[in-house]
Image (tube, rainbow, N blue to C red):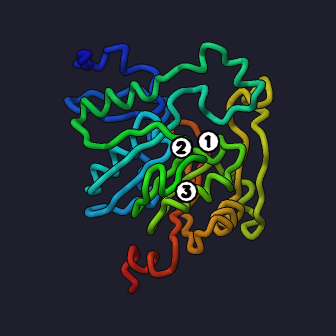
């Protein structure tokens, strides 16, 4: 097995998506540091005895957090390479050799080894999730993925098929949309940061109302928004929703039975 980093100056800790605490004082240098906003997601303090699936795990920050909170079993899935993301065909062709970049599976494996983790990693697209491919789970977590999908409603239907009790899901929202909270608003495209349409593999921005309605169409009848917050260090704005498969599941988790 390849040696693992022992110094914060190790270049292998550079260029991560997530900021992950790796043990022995070492921390990956991620684009995003979710540690200060982890309480904005609505993740239960204890997941003891629960099975958990994380979708689009990236470097594994949230999967490792679910493990830390005592989940009985955690499975993390993601597409195996940059090229397997939901690109438009034109942009996929332009990626060329870069489409084979497999940085986040490598980062996940490194973090897994350094943390002594038991999280199980599987390559999978959200569109392919079903009880036959991955099984079902008490809790499913999905962060910052819907904005990158050409068919977010289809993805939510696949997620529902594997969720027994609770889905915790976050995506990009526009705070301006919240001024009309009863309107299911969405915008398409990210023209400001993109020089060419589609180069960022980002498509949708939701209002909280639209987000909730889409979850309802996917058969999550009970949805509890957690509040709009800024992903550190500088955005985008996100909204996490805790969605339940039915009212009894909601009552069980909130202690109202």
Disc sitting over residue 236 in the figure? 1
Q: Residues within 10 Å of mark 3 (few under 14, many from 20)?
A: many
Residue 245, disc = none
The structure residue drawn at horizontal position 49% and vertical position 47%, both measured from the top left corner, is 55
Give the percent coordinates (x, y) of residue 26: 27, 27
Give the spatial CA distance, label 3 vs label 1: 24 Å
Q: Residue at the spot x=54%, y=61% of the render? A: 161
Q: Which residue is mark 3?
A: 159
Residue positioned 68% across, 30% down in the render = 200
| Relative height, residue 255 to residue 83 (above, below) | below
Expressed as whole percent of the image width and height from the top left, the position of residue 159 reads 55, 56
Q: Are marks 1 and 2 in contact (CB under 8 Å)?
A: yes
Q: CA distance from mark 1 to mark 2?
A: 6 Å
In which quadrant will I find the C terminus?
A: bottom left
SS at circle 3: helix
Extreme residue in the front direction: 132
Q: Residue 143 vs residue 213: left or right?
A: left
Say which label, 1 or 2, has the lower sequence index.
2
Residue name at image x 25 percent, y 30 percent? 113
Image coordinates for residue 249, horizontal then vertical, percent: 44, 76
What's the mark number on residue 231? 2
Place of residue 105 in the rendered image (x, y in percent of width and height, measured from the top left): 43, 29
- The CA distance from mark 3 to mark 2 is 23 Å
Q: How many marks?
A: 3
Which is more toward the observer, 91 or 207?
91
Q: Residue furthest bottom?
A: 257
Front label number (3 vs 1) = 3
Q: Secondary structure at mark 2?
A: loop
């Amino acid at each position: 097995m390849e040696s693992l980093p022992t110094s914060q100056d190790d270049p292998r800790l550079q260029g991560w998506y997530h900021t992950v605490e790796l043990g022995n004082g070492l921390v990956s240098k991620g684009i995003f540091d979710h540690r200060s906003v982890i309480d904005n997601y609505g993740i239960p303090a204890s997941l003891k005895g629960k099975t958990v699936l994380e979708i689009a795990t990236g470097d594994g920050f949230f999967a490792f957090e679910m493990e830390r909170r005592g989940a009985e079993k955690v499975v993390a899935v993601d597409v195996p390479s940059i090229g397997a993301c939901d690109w438009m065909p034109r942009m996929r062709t332009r990626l060329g050799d870069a489409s084979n970049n497999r940085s986040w599976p490598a980062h996940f494996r490194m973090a897994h080894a350094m943390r002594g983790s038991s999280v199980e990693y599987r390559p999978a697209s959200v569109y392919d999730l079903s009880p036959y491919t991955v099984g079902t789970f008490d809790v499913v977590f999905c962060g910052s993925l819907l904005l990158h999908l050409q068919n977010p409603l289809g993805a939510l239907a696949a997620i529902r098929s594997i969720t027994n009790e609770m889905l915790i899901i976050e995506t990009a929202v526009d705070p301006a949309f919240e001024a009309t909270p009863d309107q299911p608003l969405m915008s398409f495209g990210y023209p400001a940061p993109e020089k060419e349409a589609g180069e960022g593999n980002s498509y949708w921005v939701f209002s909280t109302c639209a987000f909730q309605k889409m979850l309802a169409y996917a058969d999550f009848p009970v949805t509890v928004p957690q509040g709009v917050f800024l992903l550190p260090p500088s955005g985008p704005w996100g909204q996490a929703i805790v969605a339940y498969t039915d009212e009894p599941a909601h009552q069980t988790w909130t202690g109202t039975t």
